[in-house]
């Protein structure tokens, strides 16, 4: 979702405007007055769409949909595990030579393959929902941002991190993402509409830093249970 945007430097527009509104010699080209007016009326606002997205995805409708899917996936996984355990127990009490052994082993292998497929698909389904929600939240923010910017007389609206000096990166890729998320190097604080949108969209407050927990930041990985061993692996 991060895209390279043009760097906007405060003062560039002012410099151009200064040149255009300076006294012109006789024989000024037609249309120069209209161009001067256009440059003078340009106003640029910024929003931190990244921060807005993080908060928007915590809105009740989005959060509840993710919780529901995760609960459903965990229930499906648990049911399949119970079936696997039942078949394994039934197989364990059969005496050697029992004709039912082959049938039970085939059922167990088939169900385990289905379970493995489920284990692979469950995180993908969670990721698909997260991607869909991200798109919906983004366009919700963009539509309202355009309306507010227009109401306030802005002609341009750019996306840039509000806290330009604060970022942490652990590798080159993360560093580049952080840099590209901050195309605006300098702008008046009053032209940042992020807090205005936070209030207008009634976005939930930022959560308190969570204690270290391996499952906190990995809902997709926890969507499906770890699962039993393959038939025969447990001895």
Image: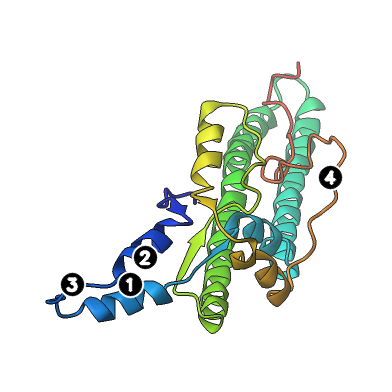
Tell me the CA gap for discs 1 and 4: 52 Å
Q: Which of labels 1 and 3 is toward the front?
A: 3
Q: Residues within 10 Å of mark 4 (few under 14, many from 20)?
A: few
Q: Could you say which quadrant of the image residue 120 lies in? A: top right
Which mark, residue 209? 4
Which mark, residue 18? 2
Q: Which secondary structure, mark 3? A: loop
Question: Colour scheme in the image?
Answer: rainbow
- Is the residue under label 2 in contact with that under label 1 (CB below 8 Å)? yes
Q: Which secondary structure, mark 4? A: loop
Q: Which circle's residue, 4 or 3, is located before the other in the chain?
A: 3
Query: Mark 3 sits on what residue?
Result: 25
Q: Which circle's residue, 1 or 4, is located before the other in the chain?
A: 1
Q: Which circle's residue, 2 or 4, is located before the other in the chain?
A: 2
Q: Which of labels 4 and 3 is toward the front?
A: 3
Q: Which secondary structure, mark 2? A: helix
Query: Mark 1 sits on what residue?
Result: 21
Tell me the CA gap for discs 1 and 3: 12 Å
Which of 56 and 43 lies nearest the eye of the viewer?
Answer: 43
Residue 186 image position (x, y, % from top left): 55, 52
Which mark, residue 205? none
In the image, residue 96 above or below residue 18:
above
């Amino acid at each position: 979702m991060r895209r390279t945007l043009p760097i906007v430097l405060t003062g560039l527009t002012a410099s151009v405007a200064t040149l255009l509104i300076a006294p012109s010699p006789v024989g000024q080209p037609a249309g120069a007055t209209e161009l001067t007016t256009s440059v003078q009326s340009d106003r640029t606002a910024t929003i931190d769409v990244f921060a807005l997205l993080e908060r928007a995805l915590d809105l009740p409708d989005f959060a509840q949909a993710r919780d529901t899917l995760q609960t459903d996936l965990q229930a499906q996984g648990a049911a399949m595990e119970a079936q696997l355990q039942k078949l394994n127990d039934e197989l364990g009490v059969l005496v050697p030579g029992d004709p039912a052994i082959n049938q039970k082993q085939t059922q167990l292998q088939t169900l385990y393959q289905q379970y493995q497929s489920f284990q692979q698909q469950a995180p993908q389904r969670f990721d698909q929902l997260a991607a869909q929600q991200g798109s919906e939240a983004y366009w919700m923010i963009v539509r309202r941002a355009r309306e507010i910017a227009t109401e306030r007389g802005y002609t341009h609206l750019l996306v840039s991190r509000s806290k330009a000096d604060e970022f942490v990166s652990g590798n080159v890729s993360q560093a580049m993402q952080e840099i590209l998320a901050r195309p605006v190097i300098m702008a008046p604080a009053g032209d940042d509409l992020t807090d205005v949108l936070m209030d207008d969209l009634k976005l939930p407050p930022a959560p308190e830093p969570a204690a270290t927990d391996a499952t906190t930041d990995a809902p997709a990985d926890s969507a499906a249970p770890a699962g039993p061993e393959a038939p025969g692996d447990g001895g």
